[in-house]
Image: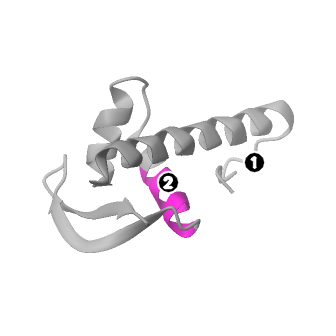
Amino acid sequence: MSYYNTTNLTGTELDDSHEKSQRQEYIVLGIFQRHKELTASDAWSYYTARKRAPLTSIRRSITNLTTDGHLKKTDRQKIGMYGKPEYIYELNA
């Protein structure tokens, strides 16, 4: 599931949200295919160069892609955009 319906959307609005989330995951996966390993903040900065999106949406995409086996979380971290450590994710070969 790409979109988590926490606001109880229905009908076309729900369908649109699912489609938008799936497109976002596809774009985020493409970003990882080009850059190989990134934090959520890194992926967000590449994503927002073309489109606007909240960091939380990029984190959701990364979580879903990790759950689906496309990415894996490493043990390594680096400081993210808010000055806190973030885990680095990489393509799952």
In this rendered view, identify the residue nearer to me: 57 or 69: 69
How many numbered circles are shown? 2
Disc 1 secondary structure class: loop
**Residue interval drawn in magenta:** 59-67
Q: Quadrant of residue 53?
A: top left
Secondary structure beneath disc 2? Answer: helix
* Residue 46 coordinates in the image, percent (x, y): 32, 35
* Residue 89, picture quadrant: bottom left
The label on residue 8 is 1
Mark 2: few/some/many CA within 10 Å (<14, 14-19, 20+): some
Give x and y (percent) for residue 29.
47, 47
State the colouring used for the structure image: one colour
- Residue that appears at 76% across and 42% down: 9
* Image side of residue 4 versus residue 90, left or right: right
Q: Which residue is mark 2?
A: 60
Residue found at the far front of this picture: 93
Residue occupying the far top of the picture = 50
Residue at point 35%, 42% (across, down): 34
- In the image: residue 2, left or right of residue 13: left
Name the image quarter holding the C terminus.
bottom left
Q: Quadrant of residue 31?
A: top left
Q: For the residue marked with disc 2, what is the amino acid?
A: Arg
Residue 83's disc number: none
Q: Are marks 2 and 1 in contact (CB under 8 Å)?
A: no
Q: In percent of the image, x 20 and y 71: which residue is there?
A: 76
Instruction: Sort mark 1 into few (<14), some (14-19) or many (20+) by Cα contacts within 10 Å.
Output: few
Judge from the rendering whether residue 43 lies leftward or rightward of residue 76; answer left or right. Answer: right
